[in-house]
Image (cartoon, rainbow, N blue to C red):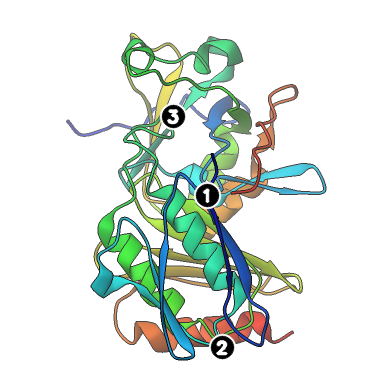
């Protein structure tokens, strides 16, 4: 099904994204964590997802899905970053990249999809604009 | 019990430790050696020699650990490390093994890709390896001037060497 842009998903609406603490997805310098730009893409190049902050809670988005629980997985140690939809749209516009932002699944409140493949530079800019949600820094894992 | 193998290759004093549960083997021949990673066939092992820089060992160890992460490791349906991306990264480590670089972050992409990320002298370099013999890169000067390419599939070795040179030279 073709995704359709929802123009109401814009401006200063904040969205949240989980950041795993492993696989060097977070780099630490002097006790300050920085997320890797790889956190702003998913397993399909052209879509990544986030949650509208006012429609969910950080605790909910850190809750593992039932199938994850069955596999013994959890989101322990994950951090959360926040960024506004306006900032996301600005990055794509600046690079003249097509973008669709839409809601995903009605059963997953506040879940949105950001559709449009970000280039390495765009991911870097998304990373720079994203801020850690206060109280939700990732765990500092021992060096591997 | 941890099994630790200390490895002191040469006059440059390269020393590294490999700790269980990952088991590595190193085959010595003369002044050179070959690092066999458990999940990679012997024919694709990383060739080492007396000039191999320390960051290459550290990067190979991190790469091997990435290979132990399961499907959905990132909670967003992330794929396991792809064989193609891993082998391409090992090729790159072999090509760049004499370059004196800092240890990079070795990041697993959600599509099973590998991304090496360096910061040095105010510069930033990211190189991504995928399953299709293609690399992408982003380099950012200390001044903020940047360059990127999402689709390098010819003269890859030369490109990587020039990016490493750029990072090394302040």
| Nearer the observer, A19 or B19 | B19
Do marks 3 and 2 both belong to one polypeptide chain?
Answer: no
Q: Is residue B7 above or below residue B28?
A: above
Q: Is residue A120 above or below residue B137?
A: above
Q: CA distance from mark 3 to mark 2?
A: 57 Å
Q: Residue at x 51, y 55 (%)?
A: B62
Q: CA distance from mark 1 to mark 3?
A: 57 Å
Question: Chain under label 3?
Answer: A
Q: Nearer the viewer, mark 3 or mark 2?
A: 2
Question: Chain under label 1?
Answer: B
Element on which disc 3 rests: loop
**Mark 2 vs mark 1: which is more N-terminal?**
1
Pointers 3 and 2 in contact (CB under 8 A)? Answer: no
Bin the neighbour count of mark 1 within 10 Å (Cα to Cα): few under 14, some 14-19, many 20 and up: few
Q: Residue under circle 2?
A: B51
Q: CA distance from mark 2 to mark 1?
A: 26 Å
Where residue A4 appears, x then y in whole percent?
29, 31
Where residue A103 appears, x then y in whole percent?
37, 22
Element on which disc 1 rests: loop
Q: Which mark is residue B3?
A: 1
Element on which disc 2 rests: loop
| Nearer the observer, B155 or B19 | B19
Q: Residue under circle 3?
A: A7
Quadrant of the frame with the C terminus of chain B? bottom right
Bin the neighbour count of mark 3 within 10 Å (Cα to Cα): few under 14, some 14-19, many 20 and up: few
Quadrant of the frame with the N terminus of chain B? top right
Q: Quadrant of residue B145?
A: bottom right
| Nearer the observer, B49 or B117 | B49
């Amino acid at each position: 099904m073709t995704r359709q842009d929802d123009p109401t998903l814009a401006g200063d609406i904040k969205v949240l994204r989980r950041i795993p603490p492993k696989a060097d997805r977070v780099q630490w310098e002097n006790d300050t964590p920085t997320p890797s730009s790889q956190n702003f893409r998913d397993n399909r190049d052209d879509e990544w997802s986030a949650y509208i902050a006012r429609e969910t809670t950080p605790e909910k988005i850190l809750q593992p899905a039932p199938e994850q629980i069955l596999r013994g997985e959890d989101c322990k140690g994950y951090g959360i970053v926040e960024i506004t939809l306006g900032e996301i749209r600005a990055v794509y516009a600046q690079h003249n990249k097509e973008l669709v932002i839409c809601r995903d699944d009605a059963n997953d409140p506040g879940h949105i999809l950001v559709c449009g493949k970000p280039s390495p530079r765009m991911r870097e800019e998304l990373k720079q604009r994203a801020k850690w949600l206060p109280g939700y820094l990732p765990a500092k894992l021992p060096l591997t | 019990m941890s099994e630790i193998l200390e490895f002191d290759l040469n006059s440059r004093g390269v020393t590294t430790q490999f700790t269980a549960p990952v088991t590595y083997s190193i085959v010595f021949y003369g002044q050179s050696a070959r690092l066999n990673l458990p999940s990679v066939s012997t024919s694709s092992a990383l060739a080492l020699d007396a000039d191999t820089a320390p960051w290459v060992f550290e990067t190979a160890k991190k790469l091997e650990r990435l290979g132990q992460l399961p499907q959905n490791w990132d909670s967003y349906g992330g794929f396991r490390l792809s064989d193609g991306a891993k082998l391409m990264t090992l090729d790159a480590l072999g090509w760049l093994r004499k370059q004196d670089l800092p240890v990079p972050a070795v990041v697993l992409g959600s599509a099973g890709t590998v991304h090496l990320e360096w910061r040095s002298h105010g510069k930033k370099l990211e190189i991504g390896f995928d399953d299709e013999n293609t690399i992408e890169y982003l380099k950012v000067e200390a001044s903020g001037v940047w360059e990127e390419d999402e689709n390098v599939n010819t003269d890859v070795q030369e490109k990587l060497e020039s990016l490493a040179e750029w990072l090394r030279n302040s």
